[in-house]
Amino acid sequence: MRDILTNPSVSDFLTSLAAGELNIETELVWVIIATALSMVGGAIGGMLLAGKDIGYQFSAMLGALFAPAGAIPAIVLGLFLLNLLTNY
């Protein structure tokens, strides 16, 4: 584990991620993190909305599948606008 964290390329990547720099690598990581969080939020929302009607596990699965459909385009658009605003 120490070898991975002391690798210069991994160290530079973690530094740029923590500093808030927007490049293609950090944007992909932020999209993956935001997609995972939207899946968790969709699962919770599905359980709250339709848990009693269709079952908690099924509603959580549907919520987790449908939540990123709206979240991913918003995330990509937001990252594009942040990148545009930081460069100009």
Image (cartoon, rainbow, N blue to C red):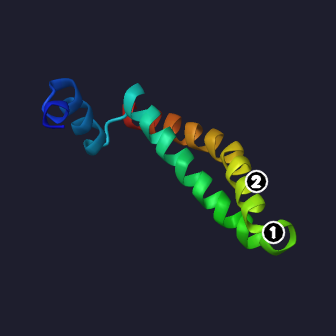
Residue 55 x %, y %? 80, 67
- Residue 62 is marked as 2
Q: Please name the amino acid that badge 1 sits on.
A: Ala
Is residue 82 shown left or right of residue 39?
Answer: left
Residue 11 x %, y %? 18, 33
Q: Residue furthest right?
A: 53
Q: Residue at x 47, y 45 (%)?
A: 33
Q: How many marks?
A: 2
Q: Determine whether label 1 and label 2 are within 8 Å by CB.
A: yes
The answer, for residue 33, to whether it is visible in the render is: yes
Residue 1 x %, y %? 19, 37
Q: Please name the amino acid that badge 2 sits on.
A: Leu
Q: Distance from label 1 to label 2 (Cα)? A: 10 Å
- Residue 50 is marked as 1
Tag 2: Cα neighbours inside 10 Å, few (<14), some, or many (≥20)? Answer: some
Q: Nearer the viewer, residue 42 or 79?
A: 42
Eyeballing the image, is 58 above or below 82? below
Is residue 11 shown left or right of residue 31?
Answer: left
> Helix or strand or loop: what does disc 2 sit on?
helix
Q: Residue at x 13, y 37 (%)?
A: 2
Q: Residue at x 67, y 52 (%)?
A: 64
Which label's residue is closer to the chain start, 1 or 2?
1
